[in-house]
Amino acid sequence: MRRRIYEIIEKSNGEDKASSIYDASMIVIIVLSLLPLAFKEETSILRIIDQITVAIFIIDYLLRWITADYKFEKKGIVSFVRYPFSVMAIIDLISILPSLSIINSGFKVLRVLRMIRALRVIRVFKALRYSKNLEIIANVLKKSKNSLIAVCVLAGGYILVSALIVFNVEPDSFESFFDAVYWATVSLTTVGYGDIYPVSTLGRVITMVSSIFGVAIIALPAGIITAGYMQEIERIDSEKNEESDLLSKGA
């Protein structure tokens, strides 16, 4: 029974119809669970939707917990102790807690209910478990993490240097160093909201240079992810072809 439950709740490879239906249903439930966040006032219908979806999430969490030994392929209590500390289990737990009334009542006292309510958005990451395409993107990010980290460090360093330069060139245009960092960030991304901007010639030249470099820096992650995505697609196609060849030889 537990093995069959595990086969159903794990992401389907397209061969198990029950697993495919479960995955599709859970994606629908995740989307419905985010619906209350689109409204400022909580109505009875939205409250019911939240309660039903959270109940399903709790059941899903418990089912995955009681089948943890199949997931980690290790018999014994170690797998059941290990599961709550896995990444997806933590995401599942965080997506459940904000909707529990006892948790919310406690946080109302601390006046951070809105922040706790916003944590429900984390439920979006639950979809990684049920979507093959999202799994591919997750694998690409994982394999390209070193390159992406290097780009992030480069972007962060450039933002810091640009902020320091413009903050000292035009101290009157920025009330704090954080404002300069904010300006450097929107300039690097070439967004330029226009709420904070330099007024001197030198400050505008710095803004131009920052925007030009921003185009190059922002383009790097897109190229890295695209190249990694194509490699991942080729790998999956290659594995499928190998499986087909093995099946044809066996036949």
Image (cartoon, rainbow, N blue to C red):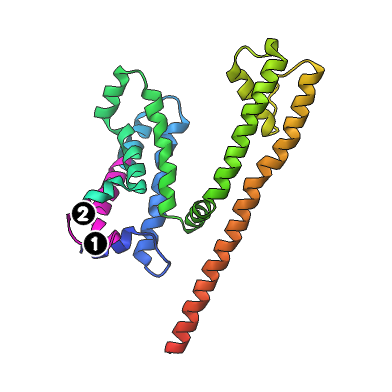
Give the vertical position of 203 relative to 84 (above or below): above
Query: Is 240 or 161 nearer to us in this picture?
Result: 161
On whether residue 58 falls in the magenta region, the answer is yes
Q: Kindly give the residue lying farthest to the left in the view shown.
A: 76
- Left or right? Give the position of 182 relative to 6: right
Residue 17, visible in the rendered structure: yes
Magenta part, dominant SS: helix
Q: Residue at x 27, y 50 (%)?
A: 83
Give the vertical position of 106 relative to 149 (above or below): above
Q: At numbered mark 1, what does the secondary structure look like: helix, strand or loop?
A: loop
Q: At numbered mark 2, what does the secondary structure look like: helix, strand or loop?
A: helix
Question: How many marks on residues?
Answer: 2
Where is residue 172 shown, x and y percent of the image?
Answer: 69, 10
**Residue 74 — which label?**
1
- Left or right? Give the position of 83 relative to 223: left
The span picked out in magenta is 54-80
Alpha carbon distance from label 2 to label 1: 8 Å
Query: Is 165 or 50 nearer to us in this picture?
Result: 165
Categorize mark 2 by other alpha carbons within 10 Å: few (<14), some (14-19), many (20+).
Answer: few
Q: Residue at x 36, y 62 (%)?
A: 19
Q: The N terminus appears in which quarter of the rendering?
A: bottom left
Give the vertical position of 114 relative to 45 (above or below): above
Query: Is 58 or 24 nearer to us in this picture?
Result: 58
- The amino acid type found where label 2 is placed reads Val
Q: Residue at x 22, y 52 (%)?
A: 80
**Residue 247 — which label?**
none
According to the image, label 2 marks what residue? 78
Look at the numbered discs 2 and 1 and tell me whether their residues touch, using CB distance below 8 Å: yes
Residue 33 lies in quadrant: top left
Residue 170 lies in quadrant: top right
Where is residue 157 shown, x and y percent of the image?
Answer: 61, 33
